[in-house]
Image (cartoon, rainbow, N blue to C red):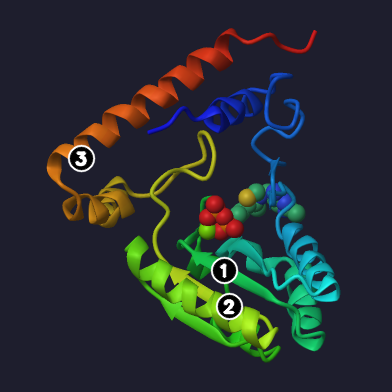
Amino acid sequence: LAYCGEIESLYLELMGKPAGLCGGRGGSQHLHYRNFYSNGVQGGIAPVATGMALAEKIKGSGAIAVVFLGDGTMGEGAVYESFNLAALWRLPILFVIENNGYAQSTPYQLQVAGELRARPAAFGIPVVERATTDVSEILSVASHLIDAVRSECRPACLLLENYRLGPHSKGDDFRDAAEINAAWESEPLRILKPRLRETDAAAIEVEVERLVQRAKENALEAAKYE
Ligand SMILES: Cc1ncc(C[n+]2csc(CCOP(=O)(O)OP(=O)(O)O)c2C)c(N)n1
Ligand SMILES: [Mg+2]
């Protein structure tokens, strides 16, 4: 792997250091790098992405917006206002909903009524659903959807069913350990690894570990805000 300054900048940002990607002021919640944005306000990124799609349509750039939402975030009203305007104004936006079965520590059954797939569909947004953690399969489905969003200039939704392997945050995981362990069998890298030569996979793992460790040490030593 080439030198990856972005990993160091991201680590600095997560630790709130001035040298971070956003001057250490966004932290883990509000990141901005090139054309990537995240927002700690649940669902807050949906209208932002919808506005970006509108801007790209007006400019005629041919670019599309892609926004990622969780199952728990489908309880936010701003998401439905975004579905409505995206469909009404035929905006080039792909909504990716990741249903990982939990909203922080609340199971899906206790927080979602009806079917998630029916929600974008109610606004006339076509939904493609996949229950997979195979990145190659997701890439192929997403490529087709992105092509359709771009060429037809209208929204679409990719609904992915999976399981959240880690805690949402720190100290808020009350799930059954056996359930979590079983889900690790379909962890995306475990699926990909056998497709690589064993020596290549091992070399990548060593190099990634080295880059992350170095970024961590660099961030720990970096100057902080006084
Ligand atoms: C407007 C708002 N309400 C509440 C929260 C607190 N909160 C953060 S994440 C979360 C649940 C997120 O669920 P989901 O989208 O499924 O993400 P996951 O837990 O799977 O990472 C809540 C309630 C928030 N960040 N913003
Ligand atoms: Mg979730």
The span from disc 2 to disc 1 (Cα, nearest Å) is 6 Å
Labels 1 & 3 near each other (Cβ < 8 A): no
For mark 3, what is the residue?
A: 200
Circle nearer the N terminus (3, 2) = 2
Q: Amino acid at mark 2?
A: Cys
Q: Of residues 61 and 207, which is closer to you in this image? A: 61
Q: In the visual, does 22 lie left or right of 15?
A: right
Give me the residue at 60% from left, 61% from top.
68
Quadrant showing the N terminus: top left
Give me the residue at 45% from left, 18% from top.
214
Image label count: 3
Give me the residue at 19% from left, 55% from top.
195
The span from disc 1 to disc 3 (Cα, nearest Å) is 31 Å
Q: Amino acid at mark 3?
A: Asp
Label 1, ligand 1: CB separation under 8 Å: no
In the rendering, at what x and y percent does residue 148 appear?
A: 57, 84
Labels 2 & 1 near each other (Cβ < 8 A): yes
Q: Which mark is residue 157?
A: 2
Q: Which mark is residue 26?
A: none
In the rendering, at what x and y percent does residue 211 appear?
A: 41, 25
Which mark lies nearer to you, 1 or 3?
A: 3
For mark 1, what is the residue?
A: 96
Quadrant assignment, res 76: bottom right
In the rendering, at what x and y percent does residue 192 appear?
A: 26, 54
Which mark lies nearer to you, 3 or 2?
A: 3
Q: Amino acid at mark 1?
A: Val
Q: Residues within 10 Å of mark 3 (few under 14, many from 20)?
A: few
The span from disc 3 to disc 2 (Cα, nearest Å) is 35 Å
Q: Residue furthest left?
A: 198
Label 1: state its secondary structure: strand
